[in-house]
Amino acid sequence: MNEYKPIYILGLPVRTIDAAMLGGLIFFLLLAAVFSGRLDNPLFLIGKGLLAGCLYIGSILWLTRLRTKTLRFLVRTASVQFMFLLEYFMARDLQLIFFSWNDRLVLVWEKALFGGQPLVWIQNLYSPMLTEWMMFVYIVYIVIYPVLGAVIFFQKGEQANEDYLFHLGAANLLCGLGFVVFPVAGPLRFEEARSLLTVPFEGGFFTQVSEILRSTVHAPGGTIPSPHCAAATVMWIMAWRYARREFFLLAPVILSLYVSTVYGRFHYASDSIIGILAGFLVLAAGPTLVRGWNRVADSHIGRRR
């Protein structure tokens, strides 16, 4: 594991995850400012982003004063994962500034690639019991984020947690950029895809919760690459690296989660496949990025001396 060294900018210790989060935020803010005329409420979007950035910088400063291990974990994890959520919503708000929805293109290439529509095929598997399991794994993913982080932090230390957070942050940022470059509304938001969904979607408690999330939190877009699949891939490989028992415990959840994104009509098969590939791309590129960051950090230390 590479050490995650800080670069001090005006006395603020900035590590790779901070650079990813603040850099992504600045990029989205610039897009919102330059293309404000294409947004419904650009001032609100920019104000929200600026406030979040100030709070995040405040959390970095606060972290330098904290000595209690539990508080350090809570502040670091909560602030970083809050930024994941914020930048997901910002990217989704910006996704139509350049291009319109590409769902029809996705349907065309999936038919050409698979010889049919996975959205149609997967309906042959529908049953209330299987639907409930699929919606459980789709929702429990939200809990895995901090819980796995806690396992890694308290078993392997802060550097391991920085490794976990950096790769998750990079995966989320890559997905956000994908939303803007290739916007896709999603199966239930695009009429041609929705017309293919003819089998009733029935389940129990977790199915009802997923439908509440769909109607109150979800909106068109935020689809390709699938953030669920990208982040799940990173979490699973990080579990292999730092928490081997949890890797095996997570296996049925992660593998089912990949399927649940299409089964639950949240994503096209392409979204999920590209999301998995995005996760592996981040895992492959991460060590090189960290080593480059550390070389810059070492040179800054040398100059300060």
Image (spheres, rainbow, N blue to C red):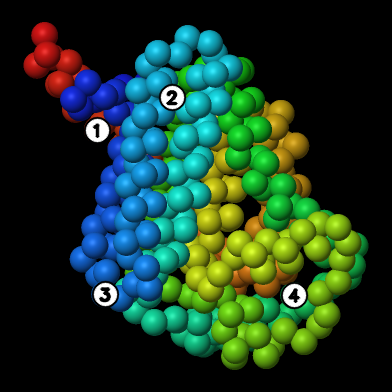
Mark 3 or mark 4, which has the lower sequence index? 3
Q: Quadrant of the N terminus?
A: top left
Return the mark for residue 106.
none
Mark 2 or mark 3, which has the lower sequence index? 2
Mark 4 or mark 2, which has the lower sequence index? 2
Q: Which residue is mark 3?
A: 37
Secondary structure beneath dot 4 equals helix
Question: In the image, which is nearer the foreground, mark 2 or mark 3?
Answer: 3
Disc 1 crowd rating (10 Å Cα; few below 14, some 14-19, many 20+) is few
Please indicate whether residue 5 sits to the left or right of residue 122 in the image: left
Please indicate whether residue 30 sits to the left or right of residue 55 in the image: left
Q: Is 224 rendered above or below residue 286?
A: below
Visible residue check, residue 226: yes
CA gap, disc 2 and disc 3: 45 Å
Q: Which residue is mark 2?
A: 1
Mark 1 or mark 3, which has the lower sequence index? 3
CA gap, disc 4 and disc 1: 44 Å
* Pointer 4 with pointer 1, Cβ within 8 A: no
Residue type, numbered disc 2 = Met
The answer to which image quadrant residue 45 occupies is bottom left
Q: Which residue is mark 1?
A: 292
